[in-house]
Amino acid sequence: MFVLVSLRDTVVIKPNYIGSNMKEIIEQELNSRLCSKVIYKVGLCISLWDILKVEESFISDVDGSYYTTVSFRIVCFRPFIDEILIGIVKSLSKTGLRVSLNFFDDIFIPAEKLRSPSRYDYEQNAWIWEYAYEGETAELRIDKHDTIRFRVVEEIWCDPNPDNDKTICSTSNDPSGYSDGNSDSLTESKAPYTIIGSVVADGLGVTCWWVS
Protein backbone atom coordinates (compact mmCIF):
# COMPACT_ATOMS: atom_id res chain seq x y z
CA MET A 1 0.00 0.00 0.00
CA PHE A 2 2.82 2.39 0.89
CA VAL A 3 6.09 2.77 -1.00
CA LEU A 4 9.30 4.63 -0.30
CA VAL A 5 10.21 6.89 -3.24
CA SER A 6 13.49 8.71 -3.90
CA LEU A 7 13.10 12.22 -5.31
CA ARG A 8 15.27 15.24 -6.07
CA ASP A 9 13.97 18.79 -5.95
CA THR A 10 14.99 22.40 -5.34
CA VAL A 11 13.94 23.90 -2.03
CA VAL A 12 13.54 27.67 -1.66
CA ILE A 13 14.11 29.10 1.81
CA LYS A 14 13.12 32.67 2.56
CA PRO A 15 15.78 35.07 3.95
CA ASN A 16 14.23 35.23 7.42
CA TYR A 17 14.95 31.52 7.92
CA ILE A 18 18.62 31.67 6.91
CA GLY A 19 20.78 31.00 9.96
CA SER A 20 18.25 28.61 11.51
CA ASN A 21 18.71 24.82 11.56
CA MET A 22 18.74 24.32 7.79
CA LYS A 23 17.99 20.58 7.92
CA GLU A 24 14.81 21.20 9.94
CA ILE A 25 13.78 24.07 7.67
CA ILE A 26 14.29 21.91 4.56
CA GLU A 27 12.25 19.08 6.12
CA GLN A 28 9.43 21.46 7.02
CA GLU A 29 9.42 22.94 3.52
CA LEU A 30 9.31 19.55 1.81
CA ASN A 31 6.53 18.28 4.07
CA SER A 32 4.53 21.47 3.63
CA ARG A 33 4.81 21.42 -0.15
CA LEU A 34 4.44 17.73 -0.90
CA CYS A 35 2.34 16.04 1.78
CA SER A 36 -1.23 15.24 0.66
CA LYS A 37 -0.22 16.02 -2.94
CA VAL A 38 -0.32 13.52 -5.81
CA ILE A 39 2.81 13.23 -7.94
CA TYR A 40 2.01 11.96 -11.44
CA LYS A 41 2.67 8.21 -11.73
CA VAL A 42 4.36 8.21 -8.30
CA GLY A 43 1.50 8.31 -5.79
CA LEU A 44 -0.04 10.33 -2.97
CA CYS A 45 2.70 11.81 -0.79
CA ILE A 46 2.21 11.01 2.89
CA SER A 47 5.31 12.11 4.79
CA LEU A 48 9.00 12.86 4.31
CA TRP A 49 11.12 9.84 5.33
CA ASP A 50 14.63 11.24 5.26
CA ILE A 51 17.04 13.54 3.47
CA LEU A 52 19.73 11.76 1.48
CA LYS A 53 21.84 14.68 0.29
CA VAL A 54 21.87 18.46 0.37
CA GLU A 55 23.69 19.69 -2.73
CA GLU A 56 25.25 23.02 -3.64
CA SER A 57 23.18 26.10 -2.88
CA PHE A 58 23.03 29.69 -4.00
CA ILE A 59 21.37 32.87 -2.77
CA SER A 60 19.16 34.75 -5.21
CA ASP A 61 20.23 38.32 -5.91
CA VAL A 62 16.57 39.19 -6.52
CA ASP A 63 14.95 38.44 -3.16
CA GLY A 64 17.75 36.96 -1.08
CA SER A 65 16.11 33.53 -0.92
CA TYR A 66 18.27 30.45 -0.42
CA TYR A 67 17.99 27.86 -3.26
CA THR A 68 19.29 24.37 -2.65
CA THR A 69 18.86 21.06 -4.46
CA VAL A 70 17.91 18.21 -2.15
CA SER A 71 17.76 14.43 -2.66
CA PHE A 72 15.30 12.80 -0.29
CA ARG A 73 12.92 9.90 0.27
CA ILE A 74 9.21 10.25 0.86
CA VAL A 75 6.48 7.78 1.83
CA CYS A 76 3.78 7.57 -0.86
CA PHE A 77 0.44 5.79 -1.05
CA ARG A 78 0.35 3.63 -4.17
CA PRO A 79 -1.16 0.16 -3.76
CA PHE A 80 -0.02 -2.50 -6.22
CA ILE A 81 -2.35 -4.17 -8.70
CA ASP A 82 -4.22 -7.10 -7.08
CA GLU A 83 -3.61 -5.75 -3.58
CA ILE A 84 -6.56 -6.18 -1.20
CA LEU A 85 -7.72 -3.05 0.64
CA ILE A 86 -10.52 -2.28 3.10
CA GLY A 87 -12.42 1.01 2.91
CA ILE A 88 -15.74 2.67 3.61
CA VAL A 89 -18.49 3.14 1.01
CA LYS A 90 -18.74 6.89 0.64
CA SER A 91 -21.42 7.13 -2.06
CA LEU A 92 -23.40 4.96 -4.49
CA SER A 93 -24.94 5.48 -7.91
CA LYS A 94 -26.14 3.35 -10.80
CA THR A 95 -22.59 3.34 -12.18
CA GLY A 96 -21.00 1.89 -9.04
CA LEU A 97 -19.48 2.74 -5.67
CA ARG A 98 -17.12 5.39 -4.43
CA VAL A 99 -14.91 4.16 -1.58
CA SER A 100 -12.84 6.10 0.94
CA LEU A 101 -9.76 5.16 2.97
CA ASN A 102 -10.23 8.36 5.03
CA PHE A 103 -6.97 9.83 3.73
CA PHE A 104 -7.77 8.98 0.07
CA ASP A 105 -11.21 9.19 -1.54
CA ASP A 106 -10.69 8.63 -5.26
CA ILE A 107 -11.51 4.92 -5.35
CA PHE A 108 -14.21 3.69 -7.69
CA ILE A 109 -15.77 0.24 -8.01
CA PRO A 110 -17.78 0.20 -11.27
CA ALA A 111 -21.03 -1.74 -11.56
CA GLU A 112 -19.40 -4.40 -13.75
CA LYS A 113 -16.88 -5.10 -10.96
CA LEU A 114 -19.63 -6.01 -8.46
CA ARG A 115 -20.83 -9.56 -7.80
CA SER A 116 -23.27 -10.95 -10.36
CA PRO A 117 -26.20 -10.75 -10.42
CA SER A 118 -26.41 -7.34 -8.73
CA ARG A 119 -28.94 -4.56 -9.13
CA TYR A 120 -29.13 -0.95 -8.06
CA ASP A 121 -32.12 0.04 -5.87
CA TYR A 122 -32.90 3.66 -6.75
CA GLU A 123 -35.37 4.17 -3.88
CA GLN A 124 -32.99 2.94 -1.19
CA ASN A 125 -29.78 4.06 -2.93
CA ALA A 126 -28.21 0.65 -2.40
CA TRP A 127 -26.64 -2.10 -4.46
CA ILE A 128 -28.04 -5.59 -3.90
CA TRP A 129 -26.30 -8.85 -4.73
CA GLU A 130 -28.81 -11.63 -5.33
CA TYR A 131 -26.82 -14.48 -3.83
CA ALA A 132 -28.09 -17.95 -4.76
CA TYR A 133 -27.25 -20.93 -2.55
CA GLU A 134 -28.81 -24.41 -2.49
CA GLY A 135 -31.89 -23.30 -4.40
CA GLU A 136 -32.52 -20.22 -2.26
CA THR A 137 -31.72 -16.55 -2.92
CA ALA A 138 -30.55 -14.01 -0.34
CA GLU A 139 -30.30 -10.28 -0.94
CA LEU A 140 -26.93 -8.99 0.26
CA ARG A 141 -26.87 -5.20 0.38
CA ILE A 142 -24.19 -2.59 -0.10
CA ASP A 143 -25.14 0.66 1.66
CA LYS A 144 -23.44 3.95 2.33
CA HIS A 145 -20.94 3.74 5.24
CA ASP A 146 -20.54 -0.04 4.88
CA THR A 147 -17.04 -1.43 5.36
CA ILE A 148 -15.97 -3.05 2.10
CA ARG A 149 -13.04 -5.24 1.07
CA PHE A 150 -11.92 -4.89 -2.55
CA ARG A 151 -9.10 -5.73 -4.93
CA VAL A 152 -7.15 -3.07 -6.82
CA VAL A 153 -7.46 -3.81 -10.55
CA GLU A 154 -6.37 -0.60 -12.25
CA GLU A 155 -4.85 2.86 -11.77
CA ILE A 156 -5.95 5.96 -13.66
CA TRP A 157 -3.58 8.94 -13.76
CA CYS A 158 -4.49 12.39 -15.05
CA ASP A 159 -1.61 14.67 -15.97
CA PRO A 160 -2.47 18.20 -14.75
CA ASN A 161 0.21 19.80 -16.95
CA PRO A 162 0.12 18.16 -20.39
CA ASP A 163 1.65 19.78 -23.45
CA ASN A 164 -1.69 20.78 -24.97
CA ASP A 165 -2.98 22.44 -21.76
CA LYS A 166 -5.79 19.90 -21.45
CA THR A 167 -6.00 17.26 -18.74
CA ILE A 168 -4.88 13.93 -20.17
CA CYS A 169 -5.60 10.60 -18.50
CA SER A 170 -3.35 7.60 -18.92
CA THR A 171 -6.18 5.15 -19.63
CA SER A 172 -9.27 5.11 -21.80
CA ASN A 173 -11.40 3.54 -19.07
CA ASP A 174 -14.20 5.82 -17.95
CA PRO A 175 -15.48 5.46 -14.36
CA SER A 176 -18.48 7.68 -15.05
CA GLY A 177 -20.08 9.16 -12.01
CA TYR A 178 -17.42 8.04 -9.54
CA SER A 179 -17.20 11.52 -8.03
CA ASP A 180 -20.83 12.45 -7.69
CA GLY A 181 -22.85 10.17 -9.92
CA ASN A 182 -23.22 12.83 -12.60
CA SER A 183 -19.86 13.08 -14.36
CA ASP A 184 -19.95 12.11 -18.01
CA SER A 185 -16.22 11.53 -18.37
CA LEU A 186 -13.07 10.94 -16.38
CA THR A 187 -11.56 14.24 -17.49
CA GLU A 188 -14.48 16.16 -15.98
CA SER A 189 -13.59 14.81 -12.55
CA LYS A 190 -9.91 15.80 -12.95
CA ALA A 191 -8.80 13.60 -10.07
CA PRO A 192 -5.02 13.26 -10.46
CA TYR A 193 -5.03 9.64 -9.30
CA THR A 194 -7.94 7.20 -9.27
CA ILE A 195 -7.95 3.57 -8.15
CA ILE A 196 -10.38 1.13 -9.79
CA GLY A 197 -11.48 -1.73 -7.55
CA SER A 198 -13.35 -5.00 -7.86
CA VAL A 199 -15.29 -7.24 -5.46
CA VAL A 200 -15.67 -10.15 -7.89
CA ALA A 201 -14.21 -12.92 -5.74
CA ASP A 202 -15.13 -14.82 -2.60
CA GLY A 203 -14.15 -12.90 0.52
CA LEU A 204 -14.55 -9.53 -1.20
CA GLY A 205 -17.44 -7.12 -0.76
CA VAL A 206 -19.08 -5.93 2.45
CA THR A 207 -17.03 -7.46 5.25
CA CYS A 208 -20.05 -8.71 7.22
CA TRP A 209 -21.05 -10.92 4.26
CA TRP A 210 -18.21 -13.28 5.12
CA VAL A 211 -18.52 -13.43 8.89
CA SER A 212 -19.19 -17.04 9.89
Image (cartoon, rainbow, N blue to C red):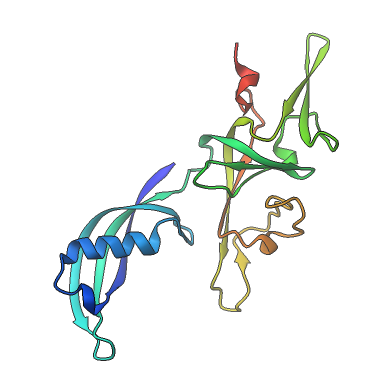
Seen in the image, is 62 located left or right of residue 162?
left
Look at 67% across and 63% down and name the residue there.
187
Seen in the image, is 157 located left or right of residue 109?
left
Q: Name the residue at the right extreme.
A: 123
Q: Name the residue at the bottom extreme.
A: 62
- Residue 129: x and y, percent? 76, 26
Q: Quadrant of residue 72?
A: bottom left
* Residue 7 in sight: no
Seen in the image, is 49 located left or right of residue 109?
left
Q: Quadrant of residue 160?
A: bottom right
- Residue 51: x and y, percent? 23, 58
Look at 85% across and 36% down and name the residue there.
123
Q: Name the residue at the front extreme.
A: 16
Q: Is residue 115 above or below residue 102?
A: above
Look at 64% across and 34% down and name the residue there.
145
Count of numbered badges drawn on the protein: 0
Q: Quadrant of residue 89?
A: top right
- The quadrant of the image that shows the N terminus is top left
- The quadrant of the image that shows the C terminus is top right
* Residue 58 in sight: yes
Look at 29% across and 71% down and name the residue there.
11
- Residue 164: x and y, percent? 61, 79
Closest to the observer, 126 or 169: 126
Closest to the observer, 120 or 113: 120
- Residue 186: x and y, percent? 68, 59
Q: Is residue 123 above or below residue 43?
A: above
